[in-house]
Image: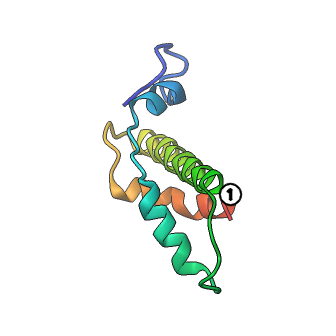
Amino acid sequence: MARYNNENDSDKIDPTTVASELKSNIKQDIIKELLHGSFQDNKTKLGNEALTLVVEIAKCLVTETCLRASSEALRDGSDKVDFEHVEKCLPQLMLDFP
């Protein structure tokens, strides 16, 4: 896990390192199908710029989830992020990303 090098900050996560190590590959086709499934009118179209923006927002959400889960793992004294750490941060994350 990416921690700060300072002794005073040993319980903090280095967000830059976590973000650089994170490899999120969100496919535009999947996002497009998910969005089309929620459209009420079949004639609704989604532009490429809007699709690109939604994919970027999804990547931000994944990155933020990883950062929060990493912080939760550190609080538990773990060097590994488990599903339980992700579960603990989901309620607040859902409030922050409505």
In the image, is residue 91 above or below residue 43? above
Q: Nearer the viewer, residue 87 or 66?
A: 66
Q: Residue at x 52, y 25 (%)?
A: 16
Q: Nearer the viewer, residue 12 or 42?
A: 42
Assign a secondary structure to mark 1.
Answer: helix
Locate residue 90, reporting x and y percent. Answer: 53, 61
Q: Which residue is mark 1?
A: 96
Q: Nearer the viewer, residue 82 or 28?
A: 28
State the residue at coordinates (41%, 44%).
24
Query: In the rendered view, does 85 fall on the left or right side of 67?
Result: left
Left or right position of 87 against 58: left
Q: Residue furthest front?
A: 43
Circle 1: residue type: Asp
Q: Percent x, y for residue 11? A: 49, 30
Q: How many marks?
A: 1
Q: Which x, y percent locates residue 80? A: 31, 41
The foreground one among 53 and 75 is 53
Quadrant in the picture for the C terminus: bottom right
| Left or right: residue 37 compared with residue 85 | right
- In the image, what residue occupies the spot 35% across and 45% down? 81
Q: Is residue 80 above or below residue 33?
A: above
| The N terminus, quarter of image | top left
> Where 6 sits versus 29, above or below?
above
Q: Position of residue 58 (x, y in %)?
A: 54, 53
User: Quick check: 91 above or below 42?
Assistant: above
Label 1: few (<14), some (14–19) or many (≥20) C-alpha neighbours in 10 Å? few
